[in-house]
Image (cartoon, rainbow, N blue to C red):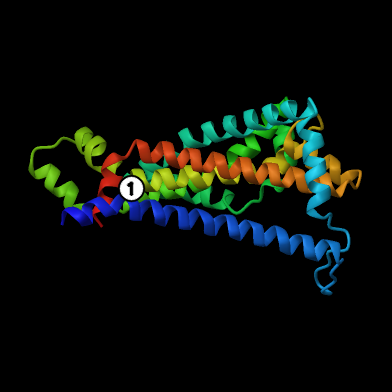
Amino acid sequence: MASTSLNLPGAAKLQLTGRLLLRVISIAACVLAWHWASTRHINLGLVTFQNVPPPKDVLQAALDLIQSPRLAQHLSASVYRVFAGFAGAAVAGILLGLVIGRSRWLEDVLLPPLEVLRPIPAVAWIPLAILMFPSSEMSMIYITFIGALFPILLNTIHGVEGVDPRLIASARSLGGRRRAIFTEVILPAAAPNIVTGLSIGMGTAWFCLVTAEMISGQFGIGYYTWASYTIQNYAEIVVGMLFIGVIGMGSSALVKKIGNALMPWYLLQRKKT
């Protein structure tokens, strides 16, 4: 038994290294496939790589952007817009999700109009956002807000509705009041779903960024990508896309990591299972 327990950390470390290596190989394989298709100008009929820049050109464009003072301006503008919209969506989505999940009456009143708005794509909000908000900055923040809101809202609702009724009944039988049941039973049980919604919402906020920054041509990674398209600088288009993807992935991972750190009971339960 002692030798088994001593070998566990080494085995876990080996498994982690193997998974990390597999992910690196996966990314490398994608880059090699991209290089092969773009340098050979592959044309599959429905899909063509004749105008797609090879990784070498994209890397050079990325290095030029990194060395330019424009990068800090673009990044700071985009990060502010995404995080401002995400923060508003987190507050609104969690609060609405909690009350809708706990009350059938509020679900009937609030959920139908929200469900009507949910399928509307971010690009369709541009004209209305311009009309509703006096500043273009607020319009862009609103579109990232809309993108993040619904994943957070729906995951919170599902988390609250999925709480085991026996847990609530047990808490009531022990004399728990409504407020205590909410804070000590419902909220902890729904927390994993809420964190998942926050992580997805952060990703969709970045997804909507290009749409948001089409409104105003000043700064931002989305604007940089769109401006590169208008002047047909294909390498810079891919650079902008990769920046959005990497930063969006990192932001979502950060949100999930913070959420998991706030749920030690959930991590302990997962380890046991």
Quick check: 204 left or right of 269?
A: right
Q: Check disc 1 and report the residue beneath it.
A: 160
Tell me if I can see residue 125 in this picture: no
Please, which residue is most extreme toward the bottom here?
Answer: 45
In the image shown, does 3 or 60 lie closer to the viewer? 3
Query: Which residue is at 22% across, 37% downward?
Result: 184
Percent of width and height locating residue 142: 63, 35
For image coordinates 30% across by 46% down, the residue present is: 267
Numbered label tally: 1
Amino acid type, mark 1 = Val
The structure residue drawn at horizontal position 52% and vertical position 42%, both measured from the top left corner, is 252
Q: Where is residue 149 in the image (x, y as percent from the top left)?
A: 53, 42
Residue found farthest to the left: 174
| Position of the N terminus by quadrant | bottom left
Quick check: 200 above or below 33?
above
Q: Quadrant of residue 68?
A: top right
Q: Quadrant of the C terminus?
A: bottom left
Between 252 and 87, the one lying in front of the other is: 252
> Farthest right residue?
231
